């Protein structure tokens, strides 16, 4: 049987397609990937433990030979899968025409290897945990012919703005390494946010360096993060964009990438974000709802990154969505000088 090239696997038809052994040829973009990760990404619906069992027993072969789970694939390798029986899953929720139009209009940058989307608020980046359809699943339905679409990083469900989606694995590797590099001058990525905080931001505070500890909640509750000496090093740079009588519009640039980092660092300086139900002020949040704000005021307003093979930095900007822009318009008459 000739090898299949770049053939995606769908959990809906795994049982029919894998009734017989299958062969797949690795292309240049997949080169360097570990065989276990390669299989997990393609065998949707197969438990990861079963993937490792297949590898241990030698039922998965590469170029007709047994391999370890940490084997890194090379272009031209032929991967053989044994016959598999997997129970069909319910079909995924279908993308509505309305959401499809919103997402299509939200793509603010695209090249051969990358999409940047101005993510709408309220849309999770991926499905699961009660979310039927996330951004990445919706994009895959919107672009059914796309061979590869993977999230480069994440945003909270209620945070709007710039998020990168790789169209090639080589771009995913490059950009995720750049995120780890942290420093834009060394090929890293700069993330820029706009946030509306309660109160007057301290004039002498331009950087918050406070370790953050993520606490696991029981009973399926969402996790919470707090400043703690036991936490991981966390740094955010802040600058004031506009002061109002009771609020401060901030630009935030996270140097590290911890969960809820900007929100918790703002709270740590007694200036929690407006609308933040987890780390904010309840009375202020109730007033914010009357102003039309139904989420925390945090928007990923820009990304700066260096693309593979280039030296110049690319910048992508995402305009404020209507709900956040509306709040600022209401505050126009409350601006302060200085």
Image (spheres, rainbow, N blue to C red):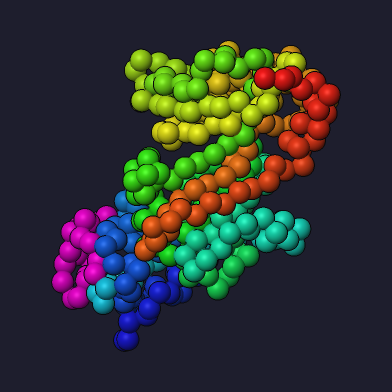
On the rendered structure, is 107 left or right of 232?
right
Q: Residue furthest bottom?
A: 1
In the picture shown, does residue 144 fall above or below 304? below
Based on the picture, tell me whether residue 72 belongs to the magenta stretch.
yes
Q: Quadrant of residue 85?
A: bottom left
Dominant secondary structure of the residues highlighted in magenta in the image? loop
Which residue is located at x 61 percent, y 49 percent?
A: 317
* Quadrant for the C terminus in the image: top right
Which residue is located at x 35 percent, y 69 percent?
A: 29
Q: Which residues are magenta?
A: 52-74
In the picture shown, does residue 29 fall above or below 207? below
Please say whether residue 276 is visible from this viewpoint: no
Taking depth in this image into account, of 113 and 215 the one nearest to the observer is 113
Taking depth in this image into account, of 194 and 5 the one nearest to the observer is 194
Based on the picture, tell me whether residue 38 belongs to the magenta stretch.
no
> What percent of the width, then of the height, locates residue 166?
47, 59
Taking depth in this image into account, of 36 and 237 the one nearest to the observer is 237
Please say whether residue 239 is visible from this viewpoint: yes
> What percent of the width, then of the height, locates residue 108?
62, 57
């Amino acid at each position: 049987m000739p090898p299949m090239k770049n053939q995606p696997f769908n959990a809906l038809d795994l049982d029919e397609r894998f009734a017989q052994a299958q062969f797949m040829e690795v292309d240049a973009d997949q080169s360097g990937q570990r065989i276990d990760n390669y299989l997990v990404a393609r065998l949707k619906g197969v438990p990861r433990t079963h993937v490792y069992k297949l590898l241990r027993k030698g039922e998965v072969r590469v170029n007709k030979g047994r391999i370890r789970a940490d084997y890194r694939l090379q272009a031209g390798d032929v991967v053989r899968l044994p016959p598999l029986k997997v129970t069909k899953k319910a079909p995924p929720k279908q993308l509505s025409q309305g959401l499809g139009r919103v997402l299509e209009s939200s793509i603010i940058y695209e090249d051969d290897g990358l999409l940047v989307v101005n993510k709408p608020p309220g849309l999770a980046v991926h499905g699961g945990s009660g979310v039927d359809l996330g951004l990445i699943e919706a994009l895959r339905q919107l672009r059914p012919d796309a061979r590869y679409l993977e999230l480069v990083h994440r945003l909270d469900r209620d945070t709007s703005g710039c998020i990168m989606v790789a169209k090639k694995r080589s771009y995913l590797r490059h950009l995720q390494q750049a995120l780890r590099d942290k420093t834009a001058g060394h090929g890293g990525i700069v993330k820029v946010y706009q946030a509306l905080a309660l109160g007057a931001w301290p004039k002498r505070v331009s950087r918050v360096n406070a370790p953050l500890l993520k606490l696991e909640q029981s009973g399926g509750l969402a996790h919470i993060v707090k400043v703690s000496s036991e936490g991981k090093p966390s740094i955010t740079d802040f600058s004031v964009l506009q002061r109002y009588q009771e609020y401060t519009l901030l630009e935030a640039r996270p140097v590290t990438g911890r969960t809820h980092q900007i929100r918790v660092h703002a709270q740590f300086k007694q200036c929690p974000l407006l609308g933040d139900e987890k780390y904010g002020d309840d009375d202020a949040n109730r007033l914010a709802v009357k102003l039309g704000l139904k989420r925390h005021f945090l928007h990923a307003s820009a990304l700066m990154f260096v693309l593979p093979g280039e030296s110049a930095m690319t910048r992508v900007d995402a305009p404020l969505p209507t709900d956040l822009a509306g709040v600022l318009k209401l505050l126009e008459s409350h601006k302060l000088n200085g």
